Every structure is written in C-alpha cells, then in structure tokens.
Amino acid sequence: MRIRRLDPTLANQIAAGEVVERPASVLKEVLENSVDAGGRRIEVDVERGGTRLVRVRDDGSGIHRDDLVLALSRHATSKIRQFEDLRQIGSMGFRGEALPSIASVSRLTLVSRQAEEESGWSVEAAGSARVSDPVPAPHAVGTTVAVRDLFFNTPARRKFLRTEKTEFRHLEGMVKALVLGHPELDVSLVHNGRQVFRLRAAAREREREDRVARVCGRRFVEHALRVEFGRGELGLQGWVAGPRAEARASDPQHLFVNGRPVRDPVVRHAIRAGCADWLGADRVPGYVLDLVLPAGDVDVNVHPAKHEVRFHDSRLVHDFVVRCLRGLAGASLLPAGSLPAADASPALRPEGKAATGVEVAETRRPYGGGEHSGRRTEVAPSARGASEDASAPLGPLAGRYAAVAGQGGIRIFDVVAARREVIFNRLQAAAHAPVPSRPFLVPETHPVGVEEADRFEAQEESLLRLGFEYRRVGPDRIMLREAPLALAGIESSEIVAVLAAALPRLASGDRHDRVPSFLRRLVEGLEPPLDWPRVGSLLQEVEALCARPESPSGRIWVELTEDSIVSLFAGTGRK
Ligand code: ADP
Ligand code: MG
C-alpha cells in the first residue's frame, strides 16, 4: 500500500483517542482552558452524565473573533511559541490539541467575547475539521464551550461509555479535583438542571478549610494536619491525615504539582514514608497536597492527558516531601530551646483537647508556614536525622547493638540506649509543645498498687501534658487510653508499670528538676523492642541529639577511630 496523508478529521479523531476518553476528560480540557484564560467564575452544566452535554462558561479573557476558527484547529495554541517555552510551562494546556480533538468526536459550539468587543462571536464544528464562520452571539466577556453528543460519529467509542451515573461520578471527581487545586475559583456544577454544588472562592484559611471539607468530607479535615512548608524554591501545602484519622476507602488522595492534578508514584511514596511514623508504614494516608516548584524543574509534557509529570530531580522532590511531613510530627523532637516557644504550635492534637488548653482552630494550623517554615525544616532533627537514605547499619549484634561505618572510623551503638535517649528527648520537649500522642485502639486496664493509683490520680494533669492519658477505673486500676507517639511499639502494660515506678519523682525534689528526673527514671525502666528496619534513622536522630556518647542513663555508643583500629593491630604480626 502507498503512503497517504491522513485527512484532518481523521487525524483529529486519532488524537482524540489519546485525550478524550469520556465526558470527564472533555470537561478536564475545557476547564483547564478556562483556568488558563484567567476565569474566576466557572459554571459547569452537564446532562446525562455529560454524554449529552458538557458546557463550561467562564469569565476569562475570551478569544479574539479572528482566532475562533483557529482555536478549533489542530496544533493551534496561544500558550507556547517555541521549544524553550516547553521547559517553562506555566499554563495547564500547551498542546493545542484539545478543542480540535473534542470537536472531531462531538458537536461543539464555542462562543466567546473579549473585553474590547461589543458582542460575542460563535463558531461551530460537528465531527469534522470544518469550522463554521463566526456569527455574532450575545455573551458576556468570557467564553462558553458546549460539547454535545459525545462520540455521536464514533459508535465504537460510544460503546465504552458507562452508565450515566458512572460518567457523572467521573465528571464530579474531575471538577472537585480542579476546585481543590484552585481555591481562587468560584465553581458551580449543575447536572440535568439541578445544582450539585457551588463552591465560592476561598481566600482565608477558614474558607479554604471549609472548601476542602465540602469536597473531601468534614471528617477528613477534622483529623488532618495542615501542611505549609517552603524551602528555597520548593513548597508543599495542603492537608494530610493525622494520627487520629481512621483509614477509609473514601480517603481523598489529591496531589497537585503547581496546581495541576497529577498522579506521581515518587511523591506518593514520599507521602507514605513521611507519615509512616504516625500512621504505620503500610498505610496510604488521605491527603490533599500541592507541591510547588519552579516550572523549569518539572516536565509536564509527558502524558497526552497531562496526568503525569517528570521531575528533573525526583530524589530531591522525594526527600523534600518526606522531610516536610516528618517535620509535621517532629516539632516535639526539637531540642529544648531551639525554637521560641510561641513558634511551636501543636500539631498532633487535631481534635484540640480541652485538657491541653488547645483550641480546635489553633491545632490544625500546626507549623504555620510563613517565614518560619523554611528554617523549621532545617533545624528539626527529624529532618536531618530521619532521612531514608541512612546507610544501613550492621547488626543486630548480640541482640541489641549496631555498627555504623563513618568517615573517621566505626561507631557501635547500643540500640536500646539510643531509643531510650530519643524517647527522653521527645518527651522532654513537652515543655515547649504538646507531645504527639496516639490513642490505643482498645484501651487496656492494668492493676497497680492503691498508693500508686493515688499517685496516678494526683499527676493526671502533668502526665497529660507529657502525652499520657489515663483514668483511674478502680481503687487499684488504671486504664491507659493514650501514650506518646515516641513510645510506639511498647505494650501498654509496660508503660503503666514504668510510669508507676517513676511517678514518685514527679512529686519530690527540686521543682525544675522533677520532670527530667521523672523522664530519666521512666526511660531507664523501658525495654523498647528493636525496630530494626528503622534503626538507621533512629541512630541518625540520636547522633543529632547527643553531642557525646554518654548520657545520664548510660553509654549510647563507642567509637573505634581509625587510629585506635590501627593500634589494635600494632605489633601483632610480621611487618
Ligand atoms: P491548549 O490549551 O493546549 O492551548 P486547546 O485546544 O485546549 O489548546 O485550546 C486552543 C486555544 O484556544 C488555547 O490556546 C486558547 O488560546 C484558546 N481557548 C480555549 N478555551 C479558551 C477559553 N475558555 N478562554 C480563552 N481562550 C480559550
Ligand atoms: Mg487546552
């Protein structure tokens, strides 16, 4: 067979195969155009799950009368001019393919008016590359795109459409994703003449939170931590499930890169790793997060429907996200005095318990972003210490030791002592910010002596501040409901036992010394289990915390310097 050039309609239909899968993909492209045009008020009107009609009206800049036909022609765009522009895409669209592709498989009407014009102009195309000449049509400044009878001329594609309900679900999901990524937009959705929602532009924090609650459910927001970090040119902002969030099938998972909704396995992995400390390693948390980075650091021209991106330095992005999120739970890891107390707002009491004196509105604004956020990421030991690329330690040796080779020699750590020291420091930080704690799924009751139970009762307030929540449920019984996150993995019976043993210290001795002395006694009584997969980051954390290998509770590491290794062999054999 000889080679022939495809006729333009067929070429458009082939291109449509890539971007137009169903009504929701039509809507995505059309909405993106409205956003690119600077529209603020966007009305979406659909009928029969979008199979009969998808119509979007915006108040953006509009299209010049003489460009209307061009807008429906292939490879025509106002968004890029030359190859270099591809490296710095600031708009949602850039391929110049969406409208002609959609027009080739539907009946499309485009009505638009720019500010200088007296009336709007309208063009139509119906399943072919031929576009009608513009005719005057009344319209306010802005654009309306109406797409009717999708796939009317491609029955094979039409067969793949699902029920009206399913298609509508996809449409709704699409609008919601856009709304989450663009709080500045006022968006309404009407289906078969009935308004499904209208979300007004959200400028203030409370409004943004409300908006997320309406889209993702109030439950999600109530149990979510606010993320607001910036470091250099990178930023991460949004919400992520906090320690009290239960896993649900409906958990939102919305990732945006510079406001563009995308799927990205690298960031997804990083989110999971970043939240693992409080959610467990195997759980994908609910999240609504927007990653902001310079347009030049990310390639958006990877996928025809622009669902995916490629980061120029994905390792950097990954580590940044992990650090931001770890830092969220890590304020209590800050060594005492490294931050002004007022700065250290509480993160992990999303329900704002009265007992801590923390208000709900306060608690969900943990590390308040702003000018401090960058610095915070830098000073938090969790950021320095808990990175994933910790060189794997050797061990466990003799059940509890681990060796790490460094620049000047080898350090052998007592992992149990290291964990105790980390726990001590995390709890000690309670002087500056509430300690992150986690409730037990099933609170257990434990027997103690009557005198001990009295002490528990007397110290309820102070222990609550340290992250322990319990109740006396009998003359000699304590029910432990919640314990600091730092004690994750330790049985509740063991916690009650060590608390009982350490409690007398809270009631005696010098006032300033009571808490540290109590905590010392507490950690010395603990036998924390060896969590080997996380030993690397534990050791980094302890090194960041302790300048010296000795702590009041004992030796944390010994060091074999190169010199001492050499001297071990000196004179032991033939030269
Ligand atoms: P792309 O978005 O990749 O440029 P499209 O086929 O989606 O390609 O749109 C073609 C052109 O039509 C756009 O570049 C833009 O100039 C114009 N356009 C489309 N929709 C709108 C709109 N709602 N408001 C203003 N201009 C629009
Ligand atoms: Mg477009």
Image (cartoon, helix red, strand yellow):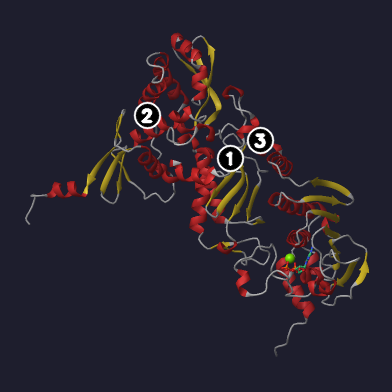
N-terminal of the two: label 1 or label 2? Answer: 1
- Horizontal side of 140 relative to 571 (left or right) equals right
Placement of 428 over or under 133, stated as above or below: above
Taking the image as four quarters, which one is ligand 2 found in?
A: bottom right
Mark 2 and mark 3: Cα distance apart in space: 35 Å
Mark 3 and mark 1: Cα distance apart in space: 17 Å
For the question of whether residue 287 can be seen, the reply is yes
The x and y percentages for residue 508 are 39, 13
The x and y percentages for residue 370 are 58, 44
Instruction: Classify mark 3: helix, strand or loop.
Output: helix
Instruction: Classify mark 1: helix, strand or loop.
Output: loop
Q: Which residue is mark 3?
A: 222
Q: Which residue is mark 2?
A: 527
Numbered badge on residue 351: none
* Three-letter code for the amino acid on which mark 2 is drawn: Glu
- Horizontal side of 526 relative to 169 (left or right) equals left
Q: Which residue is mark 1?
A: 368
Q: Quadrant of residue 80?
A: bottom right
* Three-letter code for the amino acid on which mark 1 is drawn: Gly
Q: Are marks 2 and 3 in contact (CB under 8 Å)?
A: no
Q: Name which residue lies at 81% across and 73% down.
A: 67
The x and y percentages for residue 569 are 13, 49
What is the quadrant of the N terminus in the image? Answer: bottom right
